[in-house]
Image: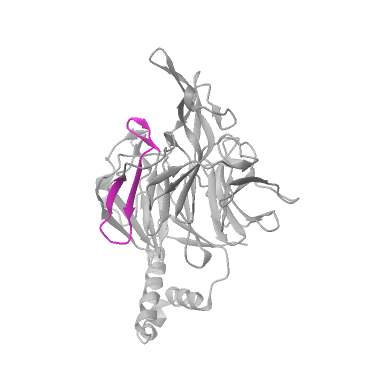
Amino acid sequence: MENSSGPRVAERELQTALGRSDHTAVVNGNILYVWGGCQTVDGEEVTLPSDEMWLYDTESGNWALREMKGDVPPLLSQTCSSHLQGRLYVFGGCDGNGHTNQMYCVNLEDGEFVWKRLTGAQGTPPSPRDKHSCWVYRERIIYFGGYGCKTVREINNVKNFTVDHTSWATIGTVIFRFWGWNNEVHVFEPETNTWFEPQTQGVRPSPRASHSSATQGSKGYVCGGMESTEMDLHCLDLDTWTWTKVYPADGPLPVGRSLHTLTSVSENTLFLFGGLSATGQPLSDVWEFDTWTGEWKERDNRDKDQPRLWHSARLGRDGDVIVFGGTRDFTVLMDSVAVLRAPSENHCSDVLVFQTQPYSLLRLCENCIGQNASVLSKQVSWLPTKLKDSTQKRISYYSAHTEHPDTTPTTNTLG
């Protein structure tokens, strides 16, 4: 993937964030923060600027652009992000020199958007990697898996690392560096700037990348991935560091996939959306997994004709799952050495909102007024200030949807 800041000018001219894939997104309050990613320009995939952040107000449906400064990260692809105590943390990925294991953070609440590169950490950080995932629990960020390179000395256990035989190379004439997938668990504590690798127990997942993970209480779930042809699901107890393979109840199951999302939407429900099947088919299906009963249930998706992969999905207000970006296609090319991916021309800029639970009466009233603002504008002016402000945002939300149906959010009530 080529690094470029070419799309910057075009991006500033838009009222919405430029369509993208492989980006970072987190929710803080009612704001969805979107950073980085890639876009296709003149048939070439380029990495989007790392010195700007897009803010999407989930209440009003409005976008805003903020400049960033400080220790601005290099242009990154396939990195892993997390949200902890009002800060965005970005770890690993690929920069212009290859895979990296650098950590950056930025405060999302002070309005300054100043990047800080975290250096001088105690302990041993993970080896450089990309396509990994993480959980957040008890003020810790816990990383799992990914794809990267290791020397022979660094490969301590073949059960923790699967070599990609098409990609390993010789460094100099003596040291061999192997590329492949891992199933390692690494923990970072921001408060003490410390790394450590816990000793896990139980049945570990196979090494993988391009999977998805979600935190639910004291449990970390992981499913899918490039090295998993079936939709397996694993659970790590984040207190005891014990792995358990989750065996689903009898019934329909989602197909194996990668580049999908898994979101915890309640104390016992995981929300699975989209991705790329093991046979290379872009997916648009929606599934929910009940961690109490072990049952997978497919939900109706009215936008099933719009597959989505390499997107982001975050939990918003009232159990909404907010999906942004991604691509609708994915072309795989084969040569005599490796599997290559053709640039996608269909990076998405729309926001999808999946309603996973019944709305409160207040939310229903706000939505009703927003959809009928033309006949209720006088009555809105009578409302108390706080309620009037929130209602005005819903009016803006539905107004934007009417004026720009291709780029503004749509709410999908699941059946």
Most extreme residue toward the bottom is 382
Q: Position of residue 178 (x, y in %)?
A: 48, 23
Q: Is residue 256 visible?
A: yes
Q: Residue 313 in the image: x percent, y percent? A: 48, 53
**270 within the magenta span:** no
The residue under the point 44% across, 60% down is 409
**Relative to the observer, which residue lies in front, 65 or 370?**
65
Residue nearest the viewer, comparing 316 with 284: 316
Q: Position of residue 40 (x, y in %)?
A: 37, 39
Seen in the image, is 400 located left or right of residue 358? left
Answer above or below: position of 371 versus 26.
below
Could you say where residue 194 lies in the image, as x and y percent from the top left? 40, 45
Rendered-image quadrant of the N terminus: top left
- In the image, is 114 to the left or to the right of 328? left
- The magenta span reads 93-117
Number of numbered markers: 0
Relative to residue 400, is residue 22 depicted above or below?
Answer: above
Quarter of the image where one finds residue 78: top left
Residue 116 sits inside the magenta stretch: yes
Quarter occupied by the C terminus: bottom right
- Residue situated in front as seen by the camera: 281 or 194: 194
Height in image: 381 above or below 253? Answer: below
